[in-house]
Image (cartoon, rainbow, N blue to C red):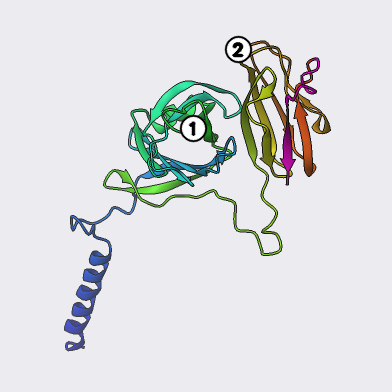
Amino acid sequence: MKKALPILIVVILIAAGIIWYLNRDVDTGNLINDALPLSRSLSLTLVEQNLSGQSGTANIFEVGDKTKIELTLRNSPAGPQPAHVHTGSCAELGGVKYPLTSPVNGTSDTTLDVSYDELLAQLPLAINVHKSVPEASVYVACADIKTNDGVSSAMPVIGGAANDMIVNNEPPTAPPDQASTPSPQAKVFNLTGKMFAFSQTEIRVNKGDTVTINFSSTEGFHDWTVDEFNARTKQVNTGEPASVTFTADKTGTFEYYCSVGQHRAMGMKGNLIVK
């Protein structure tokens, strides 16, 4: 028994050393507190706009009393693309609330001098990305900041900053027999009308998508109409805006047009293509 006691003590010391090693901070050598503070986060999908081909994610992190927003876009140009947090929603954008660092090669990282709770208290808000500095009026991707739509999580904070794990709310990969059926999305298009043409003569969406048309006149009295979906904006004069939202619940090619006078016959029309 006396011989076994020193061996037992050695085993206990070795075990204690292993536990200390596994729980230490690799940078400081200090023990990591098991009750680490939690940092909240939100991951949102940036939805393509105006046939830009660009989409991606907007990840929002709580970092102490500040908020960090990371943007990641696919199919982006190399040059900077202006981005902002706007008041309102993607369907009805308001003014700029917070400017964001312009994505370059599809990525940007901004720390806002506002807390996570303060940001969410200002909803509705939306993150909007523009095509380029000279074409800032063209929107390419947008995400509504909604806690019930995004994926929210709590993450441990080490050294006062959120860890690098990002929660992704991209739709899960469909089984092979369903991969050809895209998930319904919210699609927003910004069109203008003049004498006698629309700024865009083709719109492509998928069946089931919720489509919002933001329309305004730059010259004359016009509207935007597609009969098959019973969708029509109000008729507006130069400088006036109008919007309509509908669900593309059938496939095919459908003509949209201006219903004012003979504008349709004079060529003020385009095609809505639903796949």
Give the foreground label among 1 and 2.
2
- Is residue 266 highlighted in magenta? yes
| Residue 123 in picture, x, y percent from top left | 52, 26
In this rendering, is residue 85 above or below 166? above
Residue at (82% x, 29% y) in the render: 227
Which circle marks residue 237 in the picture?
none
Instruction: Report the front residue among 61 and 76.
Output: 76
Q: Is residue 163 above or below residue 1?
A: above
Looking at the image, residue 246 sits to the left or right of residue 31; the answer is right
Residue 216 is left or right of residue 12, and the answer is right
**Residue numbers of the magenta segment:** 261-275
Quadrant of the drawing holding the N terminus: bottom left
Q: Residues within 10 Å of mark 1 (few under 14, many from 20)?
A: many
Earlier in the chain: of badge 1 and badge 2, it is 1
Q: Position of residue 163 (x, y in %)?
A: 35, 50
Q: Secondary structure at mark 1?
A: strand
- Please identify the quarter of the rendering in which residue 59 is found: top left
Residue 15 left/right relative to 49: left
| Residue in view at x 27 percent, y 55 percent | 32
Question: Please, what is the three-letter code of the amino acid marked with disc 2?
Answer: Gly
The relative height of residue 9 versus residue 252 in the rendered view (above or below) is below
Q: Which residue is mark 2?
A: 239
